Image (cartoon, grey):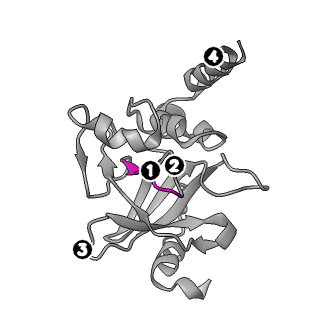
């Protein structure tokens, strides 16, 4: 019975999440990355984050070039046993973008919170977004880990409101290119 109640609770939470039209309320979301990315992007894929790349095949346009509103898919690895998905909130320059996502950094000792306009830096040898570093709140900068990326799933409709009115482009570039400066 408790498993059924838990499943029902998750289903109700997903149904209660706001759509892209109310992005401001999404920024107060606390929970897993998958329901956040689905609600923020309008990409209707279900299941663990690592499954999104294959599930998008034939249903959504996919690629390896970041676009505002696209969902970036991190595959399953030891550090990310369920993978991770996040929404591109800004493209800063060819190797730096900003994400808005849930359940990455700890806030007040707990995961699940939404973070807006965090830096993502392409560290792949071919500049193809296959390996990245992600801003991590506990480090107050790019974390030490390098994460593989499956690619980007492109939303069918424009995604707005996920980026702040005054994103810190300079801070994002410093995080990426001068990591010891912070």
Q: Residues within 10 Å of mark 4 (few under 14, many from 20)?
A: few
Which region is colored magenta?
71-78
Task: Estimate the spatial distance between the alpha carbons at disc 4 and disc 2, rounded to whole Å.
Answer: 24 Å
Camera-side residue of 172 and 45: 45
Residue 114 percent coordinates (x, y): 62, 48
First along the sequence among labels 2 and 1: 1
Name the residue: 38% across, 34% down.
43
For residue 81, the mark is 2
Residue 2 percent coordinates (x, y): 72, 17
In the displayed structure, 84 sits above or below 158; it is: below
Q: Which residue is situated farthest in the top direction here? A: 1
Side of 169 relative to 7 (left or right): left
Assess whether mark 1 and mark 2 are in contact (beta carbons under 8 angstroms): yes
Q: Quarter of the image for the C terminus: give it.
A: bottom right
For residue 126, the mark is 3
First along the sequence among labels 3 and 4: 4
Q: Residues within 10 Å of mark 3 (few under 14, many from 20)?
A: few
Number of the front mark, 1 or 4: 1
Q: Which residue is mark 1?
A: 76
Q: Which residue is mark 4?
A: 8
Assess whether mark 4 and mark 3 are in contact (beta carbons under 8 angstroms): no
Residue 97 position by quadrant: bottom left
Q: Residues within 10 Å of mark 1 (few under 14, many from 20)?
A: some
Task: Estimate the spatial distance between the alpha carbons at disc 1 and disc 4, rounded to whole Å.
Answer: 26 Å
Number of the front mark, 3 or 2: 2
Task: Estimate the spatial distance between the alpha carbons at disc 2 and disc 1, rounded to whole Å.
Answer: 5 Å
Assess whether mark 3 and mark 1 are in contact (beta carbons under 8 angstroms): no
Q: Secondary structure at mark 2?
A: loop
Residue 176 percent coordinates (x, y): 47, 77
Asked if residue 37 can be seen in this view, the reply is yes
């Amino acid at each position: 019975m408790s498993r059924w109640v838990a499943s029902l609770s998750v289903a109700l939470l997903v149904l209660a999440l706001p759509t892209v039209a109310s992005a401001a309320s999404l920024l107060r979301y606390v929970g897993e990355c998958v329901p956040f990315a689905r609600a923020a992007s309008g990409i209707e894929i279900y299941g663990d984050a690592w499954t999104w790349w294959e599930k998008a095949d034939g249903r959504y346009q996919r690629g390896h070039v970041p676009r505002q509103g696209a969902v970036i898919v991190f595959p399953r690895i030891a550090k990310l046993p369920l993978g991770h998905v996040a929404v591109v909130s800004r493209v800063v320059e060819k190797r730096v973008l900003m994400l808005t996502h849930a359940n990455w950094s700890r806030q007040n000792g707990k995961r699940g919170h939404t973070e807006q306009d965090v830096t993502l830096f392409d560290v792949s040898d071919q500049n193809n977004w296959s390996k990245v570093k992600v801003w991590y709140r506990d480090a107050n900068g790019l974390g030490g880990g390098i994460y593989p990326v499956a690619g980007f799933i492109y939303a069918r409709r424009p995604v707005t409101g996920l980026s702040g009115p005054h994103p810190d482009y300079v801070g994002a570039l410093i995080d990426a290119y001068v990591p010891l400066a912070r």
